[in-house]
Image: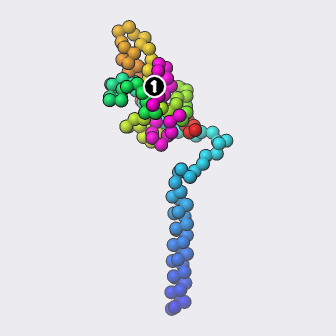
Amino acid sequence: MIRTLIIALFAVVAIGIACWAVSSQATVPLSVYTPDPESQPQAILGNISAYCPGPCCCQQFSDMITASGHRIRYGDRIVAAPSNTPFGTIVEIEGYGQFTVEDRGGAITDNKLDVLFYEKSQNPNMTDIEWSHQQALIFGRKYLQVKIDIL
């Protein structure tokens, strides 16, 4: 009887140690992970929307300065990305080329990205902001392959 109890106790301790070892390895924080510099960025399916720098899209943040402090200029290739993607990260969006992460957005989480449109108006009856807003609406929402190259 005592021998059975001792064997059972050792089994419980061994299982406990094994579970602790596995769980402690599974909870290593991502900040400890160091990517291989030789590896290529992996493509993910991104939920891509568009915005303009005007008050219609940016409300109180329509001062032409991104969350990173970058002053917006015509033709900038800027994307708003989730807060876990560092500013300066290069993002390649299928069919649209490369953009730099310089902005954030309240609804920008997980695989969502928001592409900035700011162009000179091609319509004499529209301001540059109105034109850019119209271009963002035309872009709409797309699901595209995205490669993120975190610097």
Residue 139 point in image, percent of width and height: 43, 24
Identified at 36% across, 23% down, the residue is 54
| Residue interval drawn in magenta | 69-88
Residue that badge 1 annotates: 71
Residue 62 point in image, percent of width and height: 36, 26
Q: Is residue 140 magenta?
A: no
Q: Nearer the viewer, residue 86 or 130?
A: 86
The kind of secondary structure element at disc 1 is loop
Q: Is residue 109 left or right of residue 23?
A: left
Any part of residue 140 in sight: no
Question: Magenta residues: mostly which secondary structure?
Answer: loop
Identified at 45% across, 24% down, the residue is 72
> Please, is residue 103 above or below residue 132 in the view?
below
Looking at the image, the residue that sits furthest to the right is 38
Q: Nearer the viewer, residue 42 or 81?
A: 81
User: Few, some or many C-alpha atoms within 10 Å of disc 1 (few <14, some 14-19, many ≥20)?
Assistant: few
Identified at 51% across, 72% down, the residue is 16
Residue 9 point in image, percent of width and height: 51, 82
Residue 99 point in image, percent of width and height: 52, 29
Q: Is residue 86 magenta?
A: yes
Q: Amino acid at mark 1?
A: Arg
Q: Is residue 56 left or right of residue 4?
A: left
Q: Nearer the viewer, residue 145 or 133?
A: 133
